[in-house]
């Protein structure tokens, strides 16, 4: 049976995307549900103490975003298909780098139905699938997606082949994918205090 908060959050999320009008009654109901479960943050209090129907639309949309954040709501690929597309696009440079380090597999991204939170995984050419540890939230931005997909595929290869790739050309240690302070997804080496080797896709 679907949790009423999940259903309300999904409906409000769709409204924010413009799929249907934002219903102030849904806003009030979600705030009351959250309050009943012990969440009495500022957004919840505001929605309970004010009449959502009297709040200007732009302000109401901002309040809904705060309520969704307070509820811990994370849309899945069904509610935000662009997140899956971002992960698919992230796989392209990852495979380019890994092919430069000996990978011969084709690979594709699939949705893991039944996983919580909603997740995707990369299937390698021999149908090997390490797991669905790419939640939809990884697709929020290209850099996060690239680092997450790189780490996922790298772990799959290590489990299957018992070897790490790619490796640092200077230290011969396995690289790991991170988002640099600049906001770029990079391959990093832990040797000599740590250093970035290349942006993902540029090995």
Image (tube, helix red, strand yellow):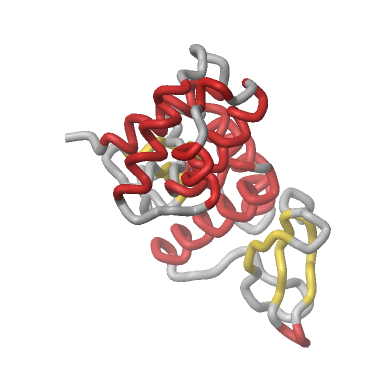
Q: Which image quadrant is residue 180 in?
A: bottom right
Name of the residue lying farthest toward the right: 182
Left/right placement of residue 108 relative to residue 143 reads: left
Report whether 132 appears left or right of 175: left
Instruction: Please name the residue shown 40% across and 65% down the image.
Output: 159
* Residue at horizontal 43 percent and vertical 36 percent from the top: 76
Tally the numbered discs.
0
Q: Position of residue 69 (x, y in %)?
A: 51, 46
* Residue 78 in which image quadrant: top left
Q: Give percent across and percent down for residue 117.
A: 37, 47
Apparent side of residue 114 relative to residue 26 in the rendered image (left or right): left
Residue for point 53% across, 60% down: 154
Q: Is residue 24 above or below residue 157?
A: above
> Most extreme residue toward the top, as rendered?
20
Quarter that holds the C terminus: bottom right
- Figure check: 111 above or below 191: above
Q: Is residue 106 visible?
A: no
Instruction: Return the x and y of residue 145 as percentages of the image width and height.
Output: 61, 47
Image: 85 above or below 169: above
104 vs 59, nearest the viewer = 59
Q: Quadrant of residue 82?
A: top right
Q: Residue at x 64, y 51 (%)?
A: 144
């Amino acid at each position: 049976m679907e949790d009423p908060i999940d259903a309300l959050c999904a409906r409000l999320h769709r409204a924010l995307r413009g799929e249907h009008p934002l219903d102030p009654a849904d806003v009030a109901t979600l705030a009351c549900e959250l309050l009943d479960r012990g969440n009495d943050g500022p957004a919840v209090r505001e929605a309970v103490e004010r009449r959502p129907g009297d709040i200007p639309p732009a302000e109401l949309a901002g309040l809904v975003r705060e309520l969704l954040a307070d509820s811990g709501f994370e849309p899945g690929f069904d509610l935000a298909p662009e997140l899956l597309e971002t992960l698919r696009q992230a796989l392209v440079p990852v495979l380019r780098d890994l092919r430069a380090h000996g990978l011969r597999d084709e690979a594709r991204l699939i949705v893991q139905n039944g996983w919580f939170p909603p997740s995707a995984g990369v299937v390698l050419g021999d149908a090997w699938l390490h797991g669905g540890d790419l939640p939809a939230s990884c697709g929020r931005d290209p850099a996060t997606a690239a680092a997450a997909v790189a780490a996922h595929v790298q772990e799959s290869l290590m489990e299957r082949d018992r070897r790490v790739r790619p490796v640092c050309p200077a230290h011969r240690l396995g690289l790991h994918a991170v988002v640099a302070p600049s906001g770029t997804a990079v391959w990093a080496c832990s040797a000599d205090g740590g250093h970035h080797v290349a942006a993902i896709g540029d090995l």
